[in-house]
Amino acid sequence: MSRDKLHPPALEKFLHEVNKKYSERIDKVILFGSYARGDYTQESDIDLLVVWKGKLLEGWEDLENIAADILVEYGVVISLKIVSPEEYKAMIDLQMPFIQTLEREGVVFG
């Protein structure tokens, strides 16, 4: 799969903006869903799990605003699931189906 297909400009822009503002707060970003699998369509959203260090409310709104700017600029919805490192570890420890899907299909950034 080509880089442009796996990392469309909207995703690249989101990752750039988030890393520029919050590189010390982001543990990792995981692309999942149809974009990660490569079976997305023009109507697909970009699903991202963000593992956020620190208080979740101290950046959540700004991340949503960055995603909204991407929607306006590129016409692509970015759907965010934001969790703490502790929540992420708990999901792994509990072997939640969502995490199993992430491990199987997800693309990790950071």
Image (cartoon, helix red, strand yellow):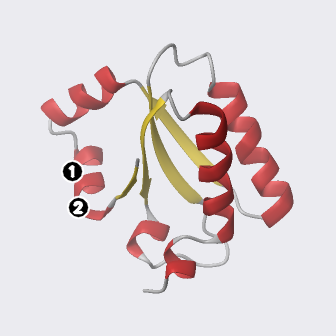
**How many numbered marks are there?**
2
Q: Horizontally, is 59 left or right of 50 in the view?
A: right
Asked if residue 61 is positioned above or below residue 108 in the image, the reply reads: above
Q: Which mark is residue 104?
A: 2
Alpha carbon distance from label 1 to label 2: 6 Å
- Residue at 78% in and 46% down: 68
Disc 1 and disc 2 in contact, CB within 8 angstroms:
yes
State the residue lying farthest toward the right: 72
| Whole-percent x, y for residue 73 in the image | 84, 60
On the image, numbered disc 1 is attached to which residue?
Answer: 100
| Whole-percent x, y for residue 71 in the image | 78, 56
Q: Quadrant of residue 31?
A: bottom left
Q: Nearer the viewer, residue 25 or 102?
A: 25
Q: Secondary structure at mark 1?
A: helix
Q: Quadrant of residue 4?
A: bottom right
Q: Quadrant of residue 103?
A: bottom left
Amino acid tagged 1? Gln
Few, some or many residues within 10 Å of mark 1 (<14, 14–19, 20+) = few
Q: Horizontally, is 36 left or right of 42 in the view?
A: left
Amino acid tagged 2? Arg
